[in-house]
Image (cartoon, rainbow, N blue to C red):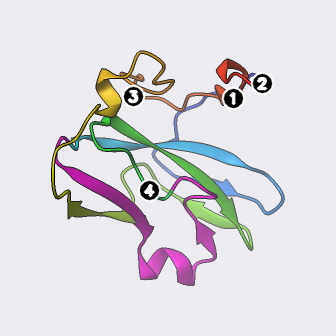
């Protein structure tokens, strides 16, 4: 499940329908006592851009840059640093038994500031 990586050029990059793109946020976040939710901005949705396919919720204890699962409804030009989403944090009540960044099997903990391919192969079935 290898992926090809590239930087968005200064003059932008056109995304096309029927192609699945992985992106990454410029912002690094840590969520030690909150559950983070990622949502697209209204302006992004009006362009026909979806920024997450299934991973709209994060784990308590996730530390890193968010991977964006991007698809578009029509061709649209995007730019590096373009605001496409927003994080919403909900506080956790009670004790957190094991935070994501403390799990031995956390597949996406400490990921680099670039898209990371699926680690589904690490799951035990």
The relative height of residue 14 versus residue 65 in the rendered view (above or below) is below
Magenta segment: does it hold 59? no
Residue 64 placement (x, y as % from top left):
32, 33
The relative height of residue 33 versus residue 30 in the rendered view (above or below) is below
Residue 82 placement (x, y as % from top left):
39, 59
What residue span does the magenta drawing correspond to?
32-55
Q: Residue furthest top?
A: 104
Check disc 3 and report its element: helix, strand or loop.
Answer: loop
Magenta segment: does it hold 47? yes
Q: Alpha-carbon distance for marks 1 and 3?
A: 20 Å
Q: Alpha-carbon distance for marks 3 and 4?
A: 19 Å
Q: Nearer the viewer, mark 2 or mark 3?
A: 2
Residue 107 placement (x, y as % from top left):
51, 24
Q: Nearer the viewer, mark 1 or mark 3?
A: 1
Check disc 1 and report its element: helix, strand or loop.
Answer: helix
Q: Residues within 10 Å of mark 3 (few under 14, many from 20)?
A: some
Mark 2–mark 1 contact, CB under 8 Å? Answer: yes
The relative height of residue 49 versus residue 121 in the rendered view (above or below) is below
Give me the residue at 57% from left, 58% from top: 52
The relative height of residue 28 versus residue 48 in the rendered view (above or below) is above
Give me the residue at 35% from left, 32% from top: 100
For label 4, the residue is 57
Q: Quadrant of residue 38?
A: bottom left
Residue 1 left/right relative to 122: right
- As rendered, which of 92 and 90 lies closer to the eye? 92
The mark that comes first in sequence, 3 or 4, is 4
Q: Nearer the viewer, mark 4 or mark 2?
A: 4
Q: Residues within 10 Å of mark 4 (few under 14, many from 20)?
A: some
Check disc 4 and report its element: helix, strand or loop.
Answer: loop
- As rendered, which of 45 and 76 lies closer to the eye? 45
The mark that comes first in sequence, 1 or 4, is 4
Q: Residues within 10 Å of mark 2 (few under 14, many from 20)?
A: few
């Amino acid at each position: 499940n290898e992926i090809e990586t590239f930087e968005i050029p200064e003059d932008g990059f056109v995304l096309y329908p029927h192609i699945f793109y992985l992106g990454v946020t410029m912002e690094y976040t840590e969520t030690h006592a909150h559950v983070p939710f990622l949502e697209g901005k209204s302006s992004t949705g009006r362009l026909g851009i979806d920024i997450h396919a299934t991973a709209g919720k994060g784990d308590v204890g996730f530390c890193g840059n968010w991977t964006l699962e991007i698809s578009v409804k029509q061709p649209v030009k995007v730019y590096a640093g373009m605001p496409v989403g927003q994080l919403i944090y909900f506080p956790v009540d009670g004790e957190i038994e094991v935070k994501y960044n403390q799990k031995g099997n956390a597949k996406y903990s400490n990921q680099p500031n670039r898209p990371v391919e699926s680690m589904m192969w690490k799951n035990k079935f």
